[in-house]
Amino acid sequence: MYVGRFAPTPSGPLHFGSLVTAVGSYCDARSKKGKWLIRLDDLDQERVVKGAHSNILDTLDSYALFWDDEPIYQSKQKHIYTHWRKKLIKELDIYPCVCSRQTIRKHSTLNGDEWIYSGYCKTHSSKDKPIRSYRIKLPTPCSVSIDDLALGLITDDLCKSSGDFVLFKPDGTPSYHLASILDDHYSGITHVVRGEDLLLSSLKQAKLQKIIGLTNSKFLHLPIVRNKEGKKLSKQNKADPIKIALASSTLFNALTFLSQSPPSELRTQNPSDIMNWAVENWKVSSIRYEGTNVKAEAAIHSTHIQDD
């Protein structure tokens, strides 16, 4: 059975980019008669904004993105992470890393927005410095492949594109990659739908799933929503929150961004009718990955016009 999920971080309200991911994830699950779960990635409490949990859930409900089962909170899964930390420390080649961000930049090369870790701490003593993280020594060969439902087969060599990546923080808190695959495993997630900007994360997670013996997820990466400066729409770039009062037009714009060609009369329908149409007519093959920043700007601008 198909089991999908949407896993926002409650660091603020949803914006248009996060809505596109939610809509794509929801449609892909429901069109295959699958379940759709909600997980709040609230493990990093420093990023959590008070009230964001309920705001996100209320927004999804108002947009007719109805989930199955109870929402899952990472902060309530710590017993799972503790069990796996003890297990993996015994079974994997994990080493302490004392590298600051400055040290990583000094000894590494940049791959897009991410630094390729050089393995500095595998060959340098760390006795006199505070431990900043624990990294996994990637077993060779470092190659990994995922068969994306839209983009096809994607293969990478993580030794060249990433290097050894972090598994735990000094206090034992799991990294995003480890927590994500453990949460997906215990929730029975079969399909992960996310933005194309997380492609390297997906490759890391697929490799990690294989290393520790978990079933590989299937992936679908959606086009990145960008602002008019060409930057990814995000909370860090001060993306505007989506508004409950504009649910219908914003859903219409999200479907347009995903190249689903909703009929114009759908724009004024209620959110439930829009999402029913979206599920019935969902086509992964229609998604386009070129010129999406132009479409995004038009979609966002259209939403703002209706708000005036």
Image (cartoon, rainbow, N blue to C red):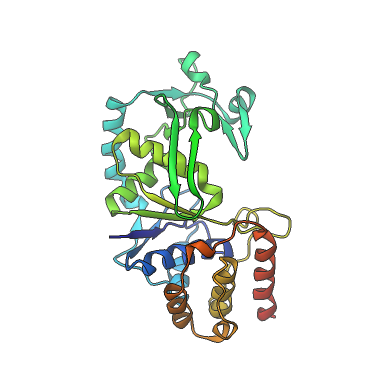
Quarter the N terminus occupies: bottom left
Q: Position of residue 104 (x, y in %)?
A: 58, 27
Q: Quadrant of residue 5?
A: bottom left
For this view, does 176 lie left or right of residue 120? left
- Which residue is drawn at the image coordinates 32% and 60% (left, top)? 2
- Which residue is drawn at the image coordinates 46% and 57% (left, top)? 8
Q: How many marks?
A: 0
Task: Reply above or below: 76 against 53.
Answer: above
Task: Reply above or below: 245 against 227.
Answer: below
Q: Position of residue 101 (x, y in %)?
A: 59, 31
Task: Reply above or below: 277 against 254.
Answer: below
Q: Quadrant of residue 66?
A: bottom left
Extreme residue toward the right, this view = 229
Q: Is residue 44 visible?
A: no
Considering depth in this image, is 204 or 288 the residue closer to the camera? 288
For this view, does 296 lie left or right of residue 219? right
Quarter the C terminus occupies: bottom right
- Which residue is drawn at the image coordinates 37% and 35% (left, top)? 172
Q: Is residue 180 visible?
A: yes
Considering depth in this image, is 259 or 100 the residue closer to the camera? 259
Task: Reply above or below: 186 against 99.
Answer: below
Considering depth in this image, is 180 or 218 the residue closer to the camera? 218
